Amino acid sequence: MMASTDGRATTVATKVEVGGNACGVAVSGDTVWVTDAKAAKLVAVDAASGRVRARYAVSATPCEVEVAAGSVWVTTQSGVVDRVDPRSGKVLASVATGAASYETIGALGAVWVSNRNGQSITRITPATNKGSTRSVGEVNAGGLVEEGGYLWVGDDTTGASAILRIDPRSWQATPVPTGGDRPGYVAATNGRVWVSNVKSGTVTGLDTTTLAPVGPPAPAGASPVNLKASADGKWVWVPDDVGDLVTRIDAATGAAVERVQVGAGPAVVAPSADGVWVTHFDDGSVWHLVLR
């Protein structure tokens, strides 16, 4: 564990036992949405109290969660993304995707899904719940984010060393080197994209205009995975699912400034107004980390 180098400290404010395999997490208003991959449930947690309000059935092996177009979108390993009504918990639609879908985002008037084993991206039109899928070549599409009008796609392949920048209008794809091995996961702050190089144990910041690295890669544990930017864009939070740590990176400098010990198998993080929520796949919990 690394002590803070910027005079601030992250503490654990809340621990919630969800059960099973807590995988994806998203925050919307006073609700924290968590998926249980083992039980195929979407769990609604009260953000203030940490109380589990409800558990809703979804398709098998759910993980990543996105709140967009008035709905909760649950990425599953069942060949579909479930669109869930946040008020009733009812699955409004199950939209077909490619194989082993990984991440879903709402951006540019649509909902986009990365399909890792399908080496493709699915575009869903929220008004119709219709999806169309396009190839990304020989790239195992992992993390997905939008910044500057482009889609940025991680390559979750050991030995890969570049992510893709895709123009969603022309579908022109530009490889962008990251300086690391298996750049599978991506996040964005204003004018920058951040990449977890899983096998290298580092995070690279990329300038979205020049495509050049922002400083040297930052160390981020043994296996940095589903990183996310803070709500104000000042920090990038990176879970290490092998070392049971979360690293905080300064988005201005690209340097790691704190490393926090968390639970077993941290998988996904989601920003809150005062910190970040982190799921733990191995022990079935979600924690709220608060930055003081």
Image (spheres, rainbow, N blue to C red):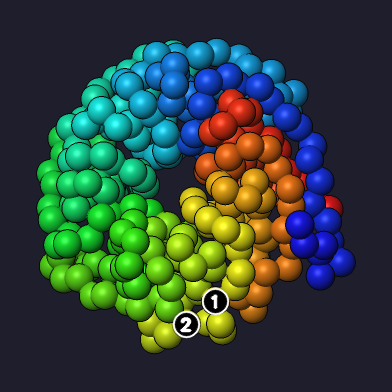
Q: What percent of the width, then of the height, locates residue 98?
A: 18, 41
Residue drawn at the location 14% of the way across and 62% of the way down: 137
- Amino acid type, label 2: Pro
Q: Please state which of residues 222 and 98 is positioned toward the viewer in this rendering.
A: 222
Q: Quadrant of residue 199?
A: bottom left
> Residue 263 in the image: x percent, y percent?
68, 38
Examine the rendering and report whether any part of residue 21 can be seen: yes
Image point (53%, 21%), residue name = 20
Above/below status of 218 relative to 126: below
Label 2, residues with CA under 10 Å away: few <14, some 14-19, many ≥20: many
Q: Residue at x 44, y 16 (%)?
A: 39
49 lies left or right of 58: right
- Name the residue that disc number 1 marks: 217
Circles 1 and 2, Cβ within 8 Å, touching? The answer is: yes
Question: Residue at label 2?
Answer: 213
Q: How many marks?
A: 2
- Any part of residue 188 in sight: no
For the point 57% across and 48% down, the residue is 242
